[in-house]
Amino acid sequence: MKFPENLKAKIDARKQTNAFRQLPSEKNLIDFASNDYIGFSKSESIFTQTHQYLIENGILQNGATGSRLISGNHNLYEIAENYIASFHQSESALIFNSGYDANVGFFSAVPQKEDIILYDELCHASIRDGIRLSTAKSYKFGHNDFEDLERLINFNDNFKKSVYIVTESVFSMDGDTPDSETLIAVSEKYNCYLVIDEAHALGVFGNPGTAKGEGLIQEYGLQDKVFARIMTFGKGLGCHGAAILGSSELRNYLVNFARSFIYTTGLSPHSVATILTAYQHLEKDKNAIQKLRENIVHFNRQKNLLSLKPIFVRSKSAIQCAIIPGNEKVKSIATQLQQNGFDVKAILSPTVPEGQERLRICLHSYNSEAEISKVLELLRNFA
């Protein structure tokens, strides 16, 4: 079948630079690649309790049947959103079909033409795509560089109505975190609206007194200082979907203007019930979160003992990245680790900037200390 020559040329260019993407086949390897940080996606208990909840409540429906504004707003949505809002100490929560939908919906709808968006240069692609759809002006600041952020705020001081500062509490490709208290101080100093994506913090960080994995912002008790938080369920919660946390006014605005919310079929009752059940497990399953934190400490200790610290991005999260420049080289090392039974993925340019290619190692509560030590020993030998 005929295929456009200009598209074929782009594919050929990817192949020539070892950047061509292909869907992987499933392999029975030790998991150091998935975002299933506390093992909820594999939880038989969550699976069984979700099924029982649906049966006991007479919910025998496979699909939502339409958008939430038409016929898809089944009762489970209200139950789940109220639970999520309470869990995260937020005035309201609005569920979206995915983290991508939440970010695209928020940034395309909330900042207006006269506004300014200032975003960390390493923000996720979904945030960037939402910003591209916005009518507001946007500028990126250096990664976790709040002096650069203040420079941009002052530069645009005479040309703005509202300023939205956008960052992540845990960055997906580096695993590092911003200085949240300094970030809050800057946003308050200039009366800005702070938006934080917590996709990789849910189930990993949280209030030390409760150990429920609420996210990094609640770990520091700063939830009342943030205009909007995006919580994604496909990582630590082990299911699918996302929620935007904020005021009731923000929720009402998104229901009326976020196109990725308005013009899509809602999640099935089963999907929403899974979200609710997973959150209930966060309330009581403290062991998984504690084991993950112990594994993070063990990983950082071992990489120091093996003299691997210089190649790793500094991180105290479940995401640990070893910078190995060059698509061909990092792919080769990832392949060798996989051949030894460890599922470790190479992150290639252009997903990350050229020269910043890396191995992205994700830690989980179900990884053993022996597995962690072994994968680092192999990395030392291959790298």
Image (spheres, grey):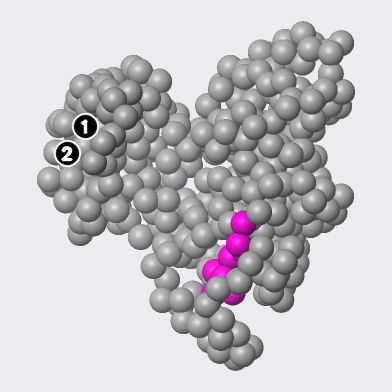
Instruction: Residue 335: give its label.
Output: 2
What amino acid does circle 2 point to?
Answer: Thr
* Quadrant, the C terminus: top left
Q: Compute the Cα span from label 2 to label 1.
A: 6 Å
Instruction: Residue 331: give its label.
Output: 1
275 in relation to 356, above or below:
below
Residue 303: percent from the left, percent from the top?
Answer: 31, 34
Q: Please state which of residues 131 and 220 is positioned toward the viewer in this rendering.
A: 131
Instruction: Residue 345: give its label.
Output: none
Q: Is residue 176 magenta?
A: no
Residue 91: percent from the left, percent from the top?
Answer: 82, 56
Q: In what element is the residue under mark 1?
A: helix
What amino acid does circle 1 point to?
Answer: Lys
Residue bounds of the magenta highlight: 264-272
Residue 71: percent from the left, percent from the top?
Answer: 70, 71
Q: Please state which of residues 84 and 159 is positioned toward the viewer in this rendering.
A: 159
Q: Is there any visible trace of residue 180 in the rendered image?
A: no
The reply to whether callout 2 and callout 1 are in contact (CB within 8 Å) is: yes
